[in-house]
């Protein structure tokens, strides 16, 4: 592994088909090229997600961070998790909204849960990865995927009845794959079913329930 260096570039939207919305993802979200220390996801799709999380907190299952180039070796990135010692690198959701009464406000919401999902069972050692100080997404040198799930408690930070105007999802890339690291595009996909930070894996979303398709963002 090596620390990520370089700059960020905004990438196009990606749309997946054939997804099982029961416990997979609802739709693809804003994508971002990650070749540096920060990866910011912005766009009206994230705004719609956050508004839905505000209006229906029980249906807030967060997002899964998925590399759009999982078929390419060396796209694996390590990102700081909510357990990272450097607070400035922890995942953060920044939301600008209009409250029921003006003026406009902006709030930064730390992640309430995050975890890594490893297709490579040797990497995961067959156990959940919800308490590490890093999360992972992308493909390793064996072209096996990793994805990260993240959740933010929007309803606890924003008053009911507010209208969300903009959303930025920030993750900090701290390392890239050695031996052929590649620039890679990542997308935040809204998760459609509950998952347990301390039990979620590539195959399972809770201790007693599997994803209908492993991942969970499989096309």
Image (spheres, helix red, strand yellow):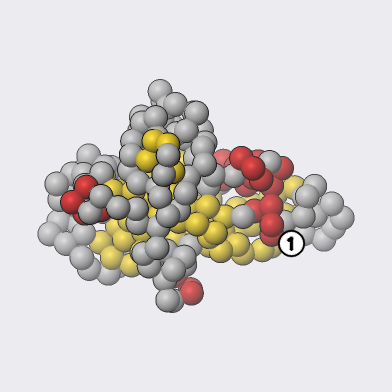
Residue lying at the far bottom in this picture: please name it.
86
Q: Nearer the viewer, residue 98 or 209?
A: 209
Question: Residue at position x 36%, y 31% from top?
Answer: 213
Q: Residue furthest right?
A: 101
Give percent across and percent down for residue 209: 42, 36
For residue 177, side relative to residue 130 (left or right): left
Above or below for 138 versus 82: above
Q: Secondary structure at mark 1?
A: strand
Vertical side of 77 occupied by 215: above or below: above
Q: Is residue 37 visible?
A: no
Can residue 198 be seen by looking at this rendering? yes
Residue under numbered circle 1: 105
Relative to the observer, which residue lies in front, 68 or 120? 120
| Residue closest to the far front | 208
Q: Residue drawn 22% across and 39% down?
A: 71
**Residue 67 drawn at (x, y percent):** 33, 46
Q: Nearer the viewer, residue 213 or 71?
A: 213
Figure quadrant of residue 20: top left
Q: Name the side, left or right, on which 28 lies relative to 72.
A: right
Q: Residues within 10 Å of mark 1 (few under 14, many from 20)?
A: some
Identify which residue is drawn at 51% across, 37% down: 193
Could you say which is closer to the camera, residue 42 or residue 59?
A: 59
> How many marks overall?
1
Left or right side of 121 for 43: right
Task: Give how far across and how far down residue 121 sits, in percent.
Answer: 22, 47
Give percent across and percent down for residue 143.
18, 44
Q: Which part of the image, by quadrant, shows the N terminus?
A: bottom left
- The quarter of the picture where the C terminus appears is top left
């Amino acid at each position: 592994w090596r620390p990520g260096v370089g700059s960020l570039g905004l990438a196009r939207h990606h749309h997946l088909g054939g997804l099982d919305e029961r416990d997979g993802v609802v739709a693809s979200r804003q994508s971002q090229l990650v070749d540096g220390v920060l990866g910011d996801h912005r766009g009206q799709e994230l705004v719609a997600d956050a508004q839905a999380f505000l209006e229906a907190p029980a249906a807030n299952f967060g997002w899964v961070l998925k590399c759009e180039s999982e078929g390419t070796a060396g796209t694996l990135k390590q990102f700081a998790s909510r357990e990272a010692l450097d607070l400035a690198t922890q995942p953060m959701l920044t939301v600008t909204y209009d409250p029921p009464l003006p003026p406009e406000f902006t709030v930064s919401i730390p992640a309430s849960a995050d975890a890594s999902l490893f297709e490579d069972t040797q990497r995961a050692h067959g156990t959940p990865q919800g308490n590490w100080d890093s999360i992972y997404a992308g493909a390793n040198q064996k072209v096996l995927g990793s994805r990260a799930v993240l959740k933010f408690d929007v309803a606890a930070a924003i008053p009911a009845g507010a209208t969300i105007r903009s959303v930025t999802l920030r993750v900090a890339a701290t390392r890239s794959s050695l031996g052929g690291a590649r620039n890679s595009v990542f997308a935040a996909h809204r998760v459609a079913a509950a998952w347990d930070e301390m039990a979620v894996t590539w195959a399972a979303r809770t201790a007693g329930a599997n994803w209908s398709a492993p991942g969970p963002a499989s096309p």
